Image: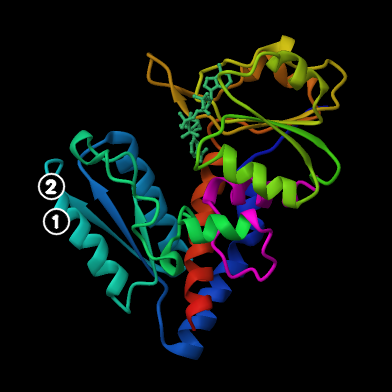
Amino acid sequence: MTEILYAKPAIDAELEALKSRTAKIKQEHGVIPTLRVILVGNDPGSIIYTNSKKKFCEKIGADCEIIKLDESVEEKVFLSEVDKLNKDMNVHAVLIQLPLPKHLSHIDTTNLVLPSKDVDGFHSENISRLYRNDKSETGLVPCTPKGILTLAKHYNFNFASKNVVIIGRSLIVGKPLSLLLTNLDATVTLAHSKTHNLKDLCLRADIIISACGKPKFLTSDYFRTDQSQIVIDVGINRLPNGTVCGDCDFDSIKDQLSAITPVPKGVGPMTIFSVAQNLLHALENSL
Ligand code: NDP
């Protein structure tokens, strides 16, 4: 029978450990892990995501404040806010919620937050650690790829020697994930919109991870019918009727697979979980 890889059991299994780490830091160092999220404007999706991050951080005993900047905020005001948080010794991690409004979208935010506070794991210093397969574990790993590993660990599947197809080569999901899984001895194919034989690649894969942002794009003909493949659906797509779906046509494909993540309740909450993990990791590194 197909296993549905819900996030909740994976998160519940790790929750106490995160709470204990927070309590230990407070007890031994008198410090409360502190995250600041910069939210510019009123994008409804961004408001939901930032609130979820705040709620989860508070659940583990950490402090998270959302710094709301006006939709029309001047570039220099936005940049000085980031700079202020970078310099604030009482702030241990900073996250810039994307997307930024149009007039700020030319800013390359990758290296704005200090690498040591870069809870998103986007800074080139952190990505370089992935690239080099740095084993020191001091780097901060991008949250969605990290969440996928936590999920896989919980459900006891690993990537070593597996043929993995990742669909989507963005800087926040596909590319860092391809490095992470290569480091874990997977054989990775990174597909994108110019890939010609995507269906064939998927049919031959052991694990398919989709992050292309196309609602119900992956239909049953992309997968074998022998219940041997695992599908991880990163996509979060809003349909015209307001409901959310993934990149996979979940109902029509699930029975032919070994396991699949649902949308919602799959990779999304794992990403938020990783934010809290990275916050603690950033602080522990600095102590
Ligand atoms: P981007 O839009 O940055 O990238 C999409 C990628 O998909 C691109 O590399 C693009 O190729 C590729 N692509 C588009 N169409 C096709 C196609 N027909 N066949 C193959 N590849 C295709 O997206 P993000 O990585 O930011 O996000 C992807 C999805 O994941 C979205 O739905 C987003 O909402 C979701 N998401 C979910 C998260 C979670 O926590 N669950 C976190 C982050 C994102 P090309 O490079 O050639 O344009």
**x, y percent for residue 121:** 49, 56
| Depth order, front residue of 108/284 | 108
Which residue is identified by label 2?
73
Residue type at the position of mark 1 = Val
Q: Find the magenta span and give its range.
A: 131-157
In the picture, residue 198 is in which quadrant?
A: top right
Secondary structure under the numbered disc 1 in the rendered image: helix
Q: Quadrant of the N terminus?
A: top right
Which residue is identified by label 1?
77
In the displayed structure image, the side of residue 129 where residue 110 appears, left or right = left
- Measure the C-alpha gap from mark 1 to mark 2: 7 Å
Q: Are marks 1 and 2 in contact (CB under 8 Å)?
A: yes
* Residue in the image at 26% along x and 49% along y: 39
Number of other residues with Cα within 10 Å of mark 2, as a class: few under 14, some 14 to 19, many 20 or more: some
In the depicted structure, whether residue 159 falls above or below residue 166:
below
* Residue in the image at 66% along x and 12% along y: 219
Residue type at the position of mark 2 = Val
Way the structure is coloured: rainbow
**x, y percent for residue 237:** 46, 24
In the displayed structure image, the side of residue 166 where residue 268 appears, left or right = left
For residue 236: magenta?
Answer: no
Secondary structure under the numbered disc 2 in the rendered image: loop
**x, y percent for residue 184:** 76, 51
Number of other residues with Cα within 10 Å of mark 1, as a class: few under 14, some 14 to 19, many 20 or more: few
In the displayed structure image, the side of residue 200 where residue 25 appears, left or right = left
For residue 135: magenta?
Answer: yes
| Depth order, front residue of 187/220 | 187
| Depth order, front residue of 78/269 | 78
